[in-house]
Image (cartoon, helix red, strand yellow):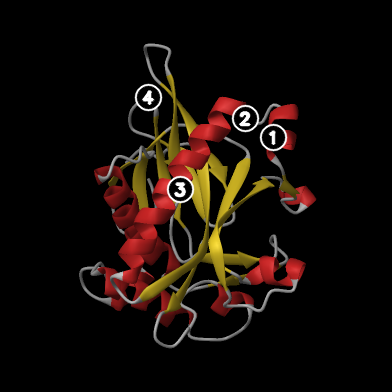
Amino acid sequence: MKRRRQIYEGKAKVLFEGPEPGTVIQYFKDDATAFNNKKKGVITGKGVLNNRISEYLMTRLGEVGVPTHFIRRLNMREQLVREVEIVPIEVVVRNVAAGSLSKRFGIPEGTPLPRAVIEYYYKNDELDDPMCSEEHITAFGWATVGEIDEIVSLTIRVNDFLCGLFLGIGIRLVDFKLEFGRLYHDNGDIQLVLADEISPDNCRLWDIATNEKMDKDRFRRDMGKVEEAYQEVARRLGILPESGPADARSTDTIQ
């Protein structure tokens, strides 16, 4: 079988040339990083679970009219996505005070916010992804005013939908990160779509009854039972791998 060309390797995923023009294969790794790559490790089976969780959430969002880059899952660790030009901004939505928000403003972790807060961070590992404003984004040409308006509109829709979805399975969506990309159509139109992934890697997910953390904070803070937390999120969503958690040790690779 012909080996496909690798396009890019990030901290959690590898991108390969897709089978058709305008497509990319996204491979989910077990590698884990925190604090802007200062802490590194491996979470066994994370790639398999994140592939399934992101597939499920992207599909559900597509069903309610949120455009995404997702096409279909190919196997345990890979999914086919549309090729997009990533907007170099991480959009963070905060519903409950936690993490850096609590540290910056001295708000006790777990404090509900009066409304969802949207923050922007410039995607640059060398600069530790600095926080930025809409003025920075437009001044430096990272996105236009119109694109920011569209990003905010889509982000609010995603937050509303995911908060309800997770509430239904006993999970509080504390905060999460989104990325967007420009999808170039053959007719010359440019469409903003949700890209990257949505998983316990980039969401803070707490059990509603106990406030137990069910996300990568367990890795960041050396809390243990990281794999079990990811599996529990998948179990509640009803999407554990077909043969159970043992499948999470799959080492499928793209050829």
Rounded to the nearest whole Å, what is the CA distance between mark 2 and mark 4? Answer: 25 Å
How dense is the environment of label 1, judged by Cα within 10 Å: few (below 14), some, or many (20 and up)? some
Mark linked to residue 21: 4
Q: Residue furthest right?
A: 127
Q: Which residue is drawn at 36% across and 73% down?
A: 233
Q: Which of marks 2 and 4 is nearer the N terminus?
A: 4
Q: Which of marks 3 and 2 is nearer the N terminus?
A: 2
Residue 144: image quadrant is top right
Q: Residue at x 48, y 85 (%)?
A: 225
Rounded to the nearest whole Å, what is the CA distance between mark 1 and mark 4? Answer: 30 Å
Residue 48 in sight: no
Residue ID for mark 1 = 137
Residue ID for mark 3 = 156
Q: What residue type is labelled 3?
A: Ile
Rounded to the nearest whole Å, what is the CA distance between mark 1 and mark 2? Answer: 6 Å
Instruction: Evaluate if marks 3 and 2 touch, with contact meaning CB atoms under 8 Å apart.
Output: no
The quarter of the rendered structure image containing the N terminus is top left
Residue ID for mark 2 = 143
Q: Residue furthest left?
A: 242
Residue 80: image quadrant is top left
Residue 31 in sight: yes
Instruction: Name the element at disc 4.
Output: loop
Query: Which residue occupies the foreground of this view, 166 or 71?
Result: 166
Q: Which of marks 3 and 1 is nearer the N terminus?
A: 1
Rounded to the nearest whole Å, what is the CA distance between mark 3 and mark 4? Answer: 31 Å
| Relative to 92, 131 lies left or right | right
Instruction: Name the element at disc 3.
Output: helix
